[in-house]
Amino acid sequence: MKRIAILVPQGAAALGCIEGAYKLFTKTNDFLLAMDKRPLFSVHLVGLTLTPQEYDGLFTVAPDLSVNDHLQMDLVIIPAVNGEMNTVIDVNRGFFAWMVQQHAGGAEVASLCVGTFLLAATGLLEGKKCATHWVAADTFRQMFPGIQLVSEKIITDEEGIYSSGGANSFWNLLIYLVEKYTDREMAILCSKYFEIEMGRYSQSPFIMFTGQRGHQDESVKLAQDFIEQNFQEKFTIDQLAVMFAVGKRSLERRFKKATGNTVSEYIQRVKMEAAKKGMETSRKNISEIMYEVGYSDTKSFRTIFKRTTGLSPVAYRNRYNKPPAFYL
């Protein structure tokens, strides 16, 4: 019997992650019983204390174990947490020593969505890769610069330390864990029962680039403004440096430090976001959109677009610029 602990965090948390994880593993037990097999999972809700936690002012989750019960687990699941992340980490510090001890005792640890912030705060992610919701990627990199965030990934598996991408992609990680602990047949059965699309590996198609503005470098902000307002035009980094009275090397260094992107990368991301919006909302063909965002080389445009979104321009348009199914 594998013991699974689902944390019941202090403060705000995504109830769906707690409920979803609980239902998936208990339903897997039901499927096993229906196959005349023994149930595999013993699922527990673990809090700092046994005091029920209220989420969204509506829903109450009552832990059946606390971190003081000293029961060794096989898997610890950290649900998504909400709020200002430094505060979220502070109010949940009581879990950290327990999680580290559980891992040292052989437990695997999985974070769902922005639960990665709590996992990172334990130190268990140092030197490892992880995923989180793309909306929180810049904040994560600022708070945990020693951890390699792969923001396009839906699932990471680093020797029993797992993480998932944003929002409902936590289901993909849970299905992945069911397959690991049982078999492919059970994973497929669960995916069909819960109607979860298997084989999703990237959240790139969902990422919306809004620019990284959480810094205090005014010259870089001015450069960002210029890029975002003139991305259709051709200009060089040298021209930007002269425009804002900054040396080229200094601008490149400061831009990378402030935004996490080089100037060239930032220009590309602005262009690609404009191209995505054009494909989502207009009836223009892909070549017209390509020229409008400042590209003239079709191969280059398609290569960069696919690298950014995980989809070809045609596949992206087919996904996001179709009438609702009930109209068909």
Image (spheres, grey):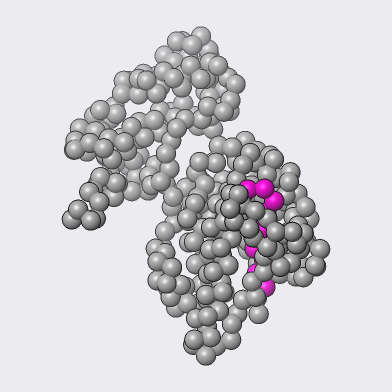
Magenta segment: does it hold 8? yes
Relative vertical location of residue 66 with respect to residue 34 in this rendering, above or below: above
Residue at 28% across, 40% down: 280
Q: Main secondary structure of the magenta part?
A: strand
Quarter of the rendering containing residue 199: bottom left
- Answer with left or right where residue 240 lies relative to residue 3: left
Residue at the extreme bottom of the image, as rendered: 36
Residue 295, given in percent of the width and then of the height, sits at 28, 30
Q: Which of 104 and 304 lies nearest the eye of the viewer? A: 104
Residues 206 and 64: in front is: 64
Residue drawn at (75%, 70%) of the image:
72
Front-most of 14 and 158?
14
Look at 74% across and 43% down and name the residue there. 90
Q: Quadrant of the C terminus?
A: bottom left
Magenta residues, as a range? 3-12
In this view of the protein, can residue 145 be seen by the observer?
A: no
Q: Residue at x 25, y 51 (%)?
A: 324
**Vertical placement of 52 versus 263: above or below?**
below
